Image: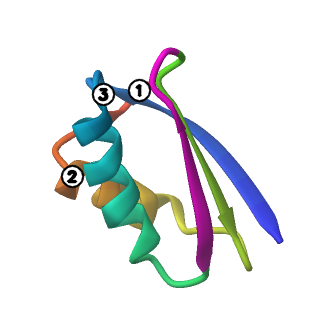
Amino acid sequence: MSTTTVNVEGMSCAGCASSVRAELSQLSGVTEVGIDLAAGTVTITSTAPVDDADLRAAIEEAGYQLAS
């Protein structure tokens, strides 16, 4: 198992979290997506490390940006 935590800009409500969760859950190997709105973090648990480009693309598809 692999766990990755990233900061995501712009998430402010349950709807935001749902959109991000839905996109990330579609990535190959992802088993769980945890979101902390207050901290602006997303924790992804997967069977193998998730490619950074795939992670960024999924978050952008949901309408948000990875924090730099």
According to the image, label 2 marks what residue? 62
Left or right: residue 9 versus residue 28 is left
Residue 22, horizontal then vertical, whole percent: 33, 63
Q: Amino acid at mark 1?
A: Ala
Identify the magenta region: 30-38
Q: Residues within 10 Å of mark 1 (few under 14, many from 20)?
A: few
- Above or below for 51 versus 35: below
Q: Residues within 10 Å of mark 2 (few under 14, many from 20)?
A: some
- Label at residue 11: 3
Residue 34, horizontal then vertical, whole percent: 58, 47
Q: Nearer the viewer, mark 1 or mark 3?
A: 3
Residue 10 or residue 65, whichever sits in front: 10
Q: Element type at marker 2?
A: loop
Q: Nearer the viewer, mark 1 or mark 2?
A: 2
Q: Element type at marker 1?
A: loop
User: Disc 1 or 3, which lies upstream in sequence?
Assistant: 3
Left or right: residue 7 versus residue 32 is left
